[in-house]
Amino acid sequence: MNSVFVLGSGFSSGAGAPLTGTVLETIFHEGRVTRQLSELKSYISAFLYQGRSDWVKTSSLEEVLSRLDIIRHYKPYPHVDYNEVIYYEELLLKEFTGLLTPERTCRLEDSYRIFADIINSGDLIITFNYDLVIENLLTGSGKDFFYPDLSFVDYGALPQKRSICVRSSVNLCETASSVRIFKLHGSINMYYCPVCGQIFCFPESVTAHPVPGASGKENDIPALLKCLKCSRQDQSIQLRHFIIAPTLFKSYSLPALRSHWFTALKTLAGAEEIFFIGYSLPLADILSYQLFDFAARLANRKQSVFLVNGPGKHHQRFGQLYGDSVCDTAMTFEDWTESKKR
Ligand SMILES: [Zn+2]
C-alpha cells in the first residue's frame, strides 16, 4: 500500500529551516547585519511602513512580498522606480532562500532517520517546502527519488561541469524503487527558463537566487544558469529561480508546474493513507486547499488521514476535507516517529 506524506514548514524546522511565521525575524536578526540587509530593511521600512521598522516583528514574509507584488503589478504611484521594487522583492527572496540551503538545514536528528526508514519505495511525498531536507534524507538513507513531470538537462555531462561542481543526487529517470517527490511551490535547486518554460534541476549545491539588476559578483550566480535550448551565441537566456513566492499572487503559469500539480492531484485521489506532517493547511493558500478538496472528492475509496502537527493544533479544516477519516495523532514529529520505530 502506497502512502502519501504531505510536508509543511513544520517538517523542516527541526532540521534548521525557519517556520513560516519566523522568517522575517530570522532574516533581519541583529547578528546578521550586512550592507545589503540594512539597505533592504531601510527600503521596506520607508516604502511600506512609513519609516517604522517594527514590521520585522509584526508582519510576515507573505504580507511584505504580497504588498510588493501588488504594487509592482498595478504600478499605482507615478514617481516610483518599479525596477527598484522588483530588485528589493527579489533581494528579500534571495535572503529567504539563503536560509534554506543544505548547509543550514542539515540537522537531521534521529527522528528524520526513522522517518526515512518508514518511507517505502513507491511512496509519495508532497512538499510545500523549498529546502532539500527530504531529498538529503532519502539520499543519506540510500533511497532513490524522482520529481514527476519536471524535465532535466544533464548539466553534469557538459564539459563546463566543473563550474557548477559536484554530484547530483537527483536521478534523471524514474526507477521502480523511486520515491516520487512533488515540490508544488518549487525548490531552491530548480530554475526555469522564462522563454521556453522548461524547469531545470541542479545539484543541491546550486541554490543561488538571481536578483535582476544586481551585479554578477553580488549575485554569485553560476555561469551555467542559462537555458541551453534558448540561448544563442549573441544572446544568453538566464534562468530564473523556480520559487513560487509565498504571496497572494502566486504564479502557476509554467506548463510543467501545472502537470506536476495535476499528477499530485491524481496521486492524492488514489492514496489509501495520507499523512500531514508539520503542515497546517494555511488559509491564505487557497489553491492548495482546492487541490486537497478536489482530490478527496475524486477518491473512490475510503482514505485514512493522519495529522502529525503536534498537540493543541486546530484540525477543523482537515475535517472539512476528509470528514471522520481524519485521525489527529496530536503528536510532534519526534513522538510520532518514535512510535513508528521499526
Ligand atoms: Zn529555454
Image (spheres, helix red, strand yellow):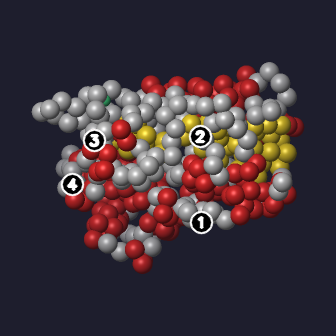
Left or right relative to 168: residue 233: left
**Residue nearer the viewer, 1 or 56:** 1
Left or right relative to 57: residue 276: right
Residue 194 versus residue 131 in the image, above or below: above
Give the SS element for disc 1: loop
- Residues packed near mark 2 inside 10 Å, few (<14), some (14 to 19) or many (20 plus): many
Give the SS element for disc 3: helix
Residue at left 51%, top 42%? 170
Q: Position of residue 199 (x, y in %)?
A: 41, 34
Residue at left 73%, top 41%? 120
Foreground mark, 4 or 2, reads 2
Q: CA distance from mark 4 to mark 3?
A: 22 Å
Q: Position of residue 163 (x, y in %)?
A: 29, 51
* Mark number displayed over residue 107: 1
Identified by mark 2, the residue type is Phe
Q: CA distance from mark 3 to mark 2?
A: 26 Å
